[in-house]
Amino acid sequence: MRLTWLEETQEEFRDLDLTQLNVDQALVNITSKFPVPLWSYTASAECHRCHFARNQEIFRNDELLLEVDTKFHLLWRFYKRNLGRYTDSTNASDFICQVSPDVGEFGVYDIVIDSAGNCNVHTAHEPVNIYWPLLLYMFIIINLLVIFMGARWGYKRFCTKRPPPRPASSSCSTEARGKRHRHRLRSLDTFRGIITVVMIFVNNGGGSYWFMEHSIWNGLLVPDLIFPSFLWIMGVSIALSVNSLITQKVSKANILLQILKRSMIMFFLGLFLNTIYGAQFKTLRIMGILQRLGICYLIVASLHTIFRRSDIVTPPNPLRGPYQDMLLLLPEWCIMLTLVILYLAVSFFLPVPGCGSGYLGPGGRHDYGKFRDCPGGATGYIDKLILGENHISEYASTTAVYESKPIDSENLFGTVLSVVHAFLGVQCGMTLLVYNHWRAKVQRWMLWGVTAGLLGGLLCGFSRDEGWIPINQVMWSLSYVLVTTSFAYLTFSLLYVLVDVPVVAKRLGWGGGPFYFVGMNTILIFIGDEICHSMLPFHWRLGRMNTHFMLLLENGWTTFIWILIALILYRKKWFFIV
């Protein structure tokens, strides 16, 4: 008996060994009774404006058995003759029929073409439900969190003794204690920790679910929210840390030196991680996640330090009160808007050799092959021009679907709007410093979040592919910046209320754990995960590992181990600070 919630595959069906299928695979058996041989062509729903690609020839009364990927919906067409490697969707020459079967993991499907040229689809073997393991996994996580919070509450309630109140005449003044124990914005560390946990889970496979992988080109899935959230959080931290240093009377020259040091450390850490499988200078990848973070930190933190004013605590002018937090950043806003205009001008008007101007696609089969050698348009061209083809990422998810040349996911030109992304976090930090009451802060953040989301939606036409500027993580498009900024503002607003607003946090009794502990050591955990990616006890294999259930167990175990390490480091007060 098949336990579909565990995704145990039936060993044999029609003499087919279904256990040899990998995760997200199914079998399609094509049978033709048409008088003449036919040619099958397919097009993926993920491949926007692509030609149909040729598969194989099918003879009369023959059967063609194919393993197909169930992640992306396929449209099948059958022609009476070979139309070449590709044929566009409008080609009706010798067209017989088409079908679009809804295939699922470990299912077996029959496509039968009768003598009259009609296509019929039958489900011979039912697929498994890939979402049952995910529901079970979420149920386990929720229960573990409830147990953790309950144990923490019980420990504080029954196992700890409150220290007696200190007398007012204590030699350690309140002011001195405040200087030694600087208050951290706990909700910001919690937000960073949540994003880090999701990043670890995704980087280690995410259970191989389609929504736990980056969008092939345009669109927004769970992993596409991770990196922009880190940039935004870094921007908030910049506003708070620069304010703290200036309050302590540290000179701007010294602050700028610290910024330069941290930026260089981040950049070179990322560069060293690119050599984890060997250092070949001729093909060394230059850019990466930490490299882009380092560049953005250098630019945004330096600008904020240079233009930082010291009068933000003064009562706001009644005429400019609602805009005080923006006016304090007016010089920086002018620079950021200039960067946005520059980015758009280059993206839409820079003439790219062999590609023209204004192309925003992945190249390859996209747009029916008109821009086959133009991945990313101006973005890809600038990377090749400055860094060279040998120094960009060799892997790109677009190559499998669009058959295009790779484009670096952390490309150099996309850093321009990444700087703007980080600055929008600085704006959030400035709001935190300017407004006194938590309601005013949250209302302001909610307004920013909703406005940014609507602007991003208008730019992309509230669609994946058809807007003026589609949401695109690789290109780091303006709509992508606005929509992910909206997510960051709204998520942080919620966490701020739950964790840092005393009247709410006291009732809930939740201090952000276990995510808070992870957020205190994000860079260390990121580096550790990159280095230990294939090592015990973080990773293991048991059997074929060809089901979502087994992959969820392994990926969840890896994530749990890193959370446990973060908790131990926090308890020992070991923090990796760049």
Image (spheres, rainbow, N blue to C red):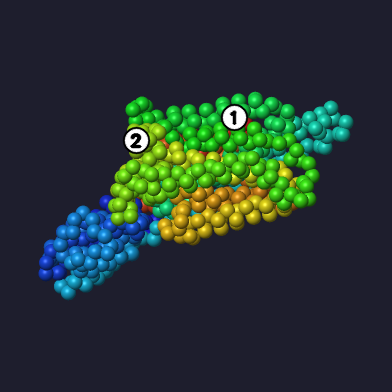
| Location of residue 432 by image quarter | top right
Residue 1 in sight here: no
**Residue at 78% of width from left, 50% of height from top?**
318
Q: Which is more toward the observer, 344 or 92?
A: 344
In the rendered view of the protein, which quadrant contains the C terminus? Answer: top right
From the top left corner, tell me how far across and down residue 294 is, in percent.
Answer: 52, 33
- Kind of residue sitting beneath label 1: Ile
Q: Describe the element under mark 1 as helix, strand or loop.
A: helix
> Would you name the residue on which mark 2 appears?
389
Q: Are marks 2 and 1 in contact (CB under 8 Å)?
A: no
- Disc ID at residue 75: none
**Residue at 33% of width from left, 42% of height from top?**
353
From the top left corner, tell me how far across and down residue 567 is, in percent.
Answer: 58, 38
Q: Describe the element under mark 2 as helix, strand or loop.
A: helix
N-terminal-most mark, 2 or 1: 1
Cα gap from disc 2 to disc 1, whole angstroms = 31 Å
